[in-house]
Image (cartoon, rainbow, N blue to C red):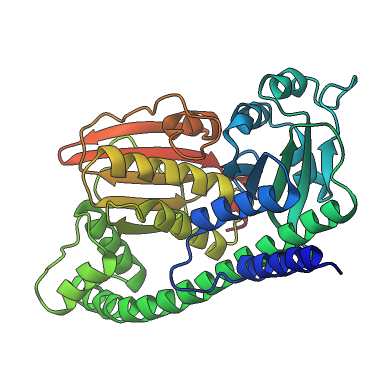
């Protein structure tokens, strides 16, 4: 091996190690993906690269891009939900176009867009480790030709290394989150159970009804159920048995409904916490087939509440027959803000356009101290409850 060859090999090894090392305390996904894109452009000698991660309404969404000349082409592919990246994601195998100027392209609409931004070829490689695909690496070239031989093998190695790094980070984050959730759940469960017993005895009701009273009071006051329960246990709060508050036009979930609510701080963490809450509740109720849609719509409404309302943000999910109702409350005005037309390479900022598209019904209910935005998803599987 020549000295130059040995140096190049050493550089590749350093980069592969860097891509798999995602366990440091300062790791940040967006910066990591930007770095990954630039490293792939350097090592594979292409002017532009892009990374798509799995998830979102299209199945994959753009997460990072290196090389501004390719942005128009990538946006075109996202609008069409078609191109090498989507084929690669769908099949789990490399896909590409050696020459966008060739006749009979699988994606004829991409040829003019590619020519306009100076891209002659595009190749996509799955970012996969041990059978789990986390995304797609796309390589865009200024001249026609395949990414083959040693370059092709290196592209696969880089994509696998990045997949390994992202999965390690995800698994570590999940372990940390689970540990925190367990601790929080333990701390919260004690006062709730005590308060349920106190209310059941004081009001001569069963414990199930006492939990409903706690939940409804917390929802009406924009407070967490464990905090309300702690006040009941300490004697600082006396909840009386009254008819449940009117829902002011929000659809009821139906007979036998399961219900859960949570209060979130109005900050950047709220959408993620809201998605996790809805996913956890649907999972606990044995319903996961439309969890992705429910989480997406919830995230959009909570994002709207954080940006345009005043906190805290209340979130309630009610599961019945045959529909699921999700409500998001905030202290803002009684109107909701409609987001501007979204940019094609973003997964946020789509707001009510996505809610209108995916929800069976939705609406806004103004109140004295804020507003409630709700949506409904049909839930035929709830018949098993």
Q: Is residue 275 above or below residue 377?
A: below
The residue shown at (62%, 45%) is 380
Q: Is residue 306 above or below residue 11?
A: above
> Taking 249 as reference, is 273 left or right?
right
Counting from the top left corner in percent of width and height, residue 277 is at 44, 59
| Quarter of the rendering containing residue 341 | top left
Q: Quadrant of the C terminus?
A: bottom right
Q: Nearer the viewer, residue 57 or 186?
A: 57
> Taking 60 as reference, is 342 left or right?
left
Q: Quadrant of the N terminus?
A: bottom right
Mark yes or no: residue 251 visible: no
Number of numbered labels in the structure image? 0
The outermost residue toward the front is 3
Q: Nearer the viewer, residue 111 or 270?
A: 111
Counting from the top left corner in percent of width and height, residue 347 is at 51, 40
Counting from the top left corner in percent of width and height, residue 366 is at 24, 33
The residue shown at (50%, 33%) is 354
> Taking 54 as reference, is 178 left or right?
left
Mark yes or no: residue 369 visible: yes
Counting from the top left corner in percent of width and height, residue 131 is at 79, 63
| Quarter of the rendering containing residue 286 | bottom right
The residue shown at (77%, 67%) is 9
Q: Is residue 348 above or below residue 340?
A: below
Q: Nearer the viewer, residue 321 or 31?
A: 31
């Amino acid at each position: 091996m020549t000295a130059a060859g040995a140096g190049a090999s050493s550089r590749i090894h350093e980069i592969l190690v860097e891509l798999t090392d995602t366990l440091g305390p300062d790791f940040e996904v967006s910066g990591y993906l930007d770095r990954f894109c630039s490293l792939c452009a350097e090592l594979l000698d292409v002017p532009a690269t892009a990374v798509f991660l799995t998830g979102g309404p299209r199945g994959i969404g753009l997460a990072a891009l290196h090389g501004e000349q390719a942005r128009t082409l990538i946006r075109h592919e996202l609008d069409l939900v078609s191109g090498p990246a989507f084929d690669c994601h769908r099949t789990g195998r490399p896909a590409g176009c050696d020459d966008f100027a060739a006749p009979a392209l699988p994606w004829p609409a991409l040829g003019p867009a590619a020519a306009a931004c100076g891209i002659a070829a595009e190749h996509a490689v799955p970012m996969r480790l041990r059978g789990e695909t986390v995304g797609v690496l796309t390589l865009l070239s200024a001249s026609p030709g395949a990414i083959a031989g040693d370059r092709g093998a290196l592209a696969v190695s880089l994509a696998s290394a990045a997949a390994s790094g992202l999965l390690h980070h995800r698994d570590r984050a999940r372990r940390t989150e689970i540990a925190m959730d367990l601790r929080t759940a333990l701390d919260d469960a004690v006062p709730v159970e005590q308060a349920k017993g106190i209310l059941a005895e004081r009001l001569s009701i069963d414990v199930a009804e006492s939990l409903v009273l706690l939940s409804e009071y917390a929802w009406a006051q924009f407070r967490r159920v464990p905090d309300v329960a702690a006040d009941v246990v300490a004697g600082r709060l006396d909840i009386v048995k009254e008819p449940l508050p009117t829902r002011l036009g929000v659809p009821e979930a139906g007979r036998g409904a399961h219900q859960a609510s949570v209060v979130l701080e109005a900050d950047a963490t709220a959408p993620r916490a809201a998605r996790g809450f809805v996913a956890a509740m649907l999972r606990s109720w044995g319903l996961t087939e439309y969890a992705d849609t429910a989480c997406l719509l919830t995230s959009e409404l909570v994002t709207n509440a954080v940006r345009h309302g005043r906190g805290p943000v209340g979130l309630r999910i009610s599961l019945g027959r045959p529909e699921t109702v999700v409500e998001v409350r905030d202290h803002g005005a009684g109107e909701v803000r409609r987001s501007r037309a979204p940019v094609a390479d973003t997964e946020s900022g789509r707001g009510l356009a996505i809610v209108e598209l995916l929800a069976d019904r939705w609406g806004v209910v103004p109140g004295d101290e804020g507003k409630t935005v709700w949506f409904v998803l049909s839930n035929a599987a709830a018949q098993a409850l």
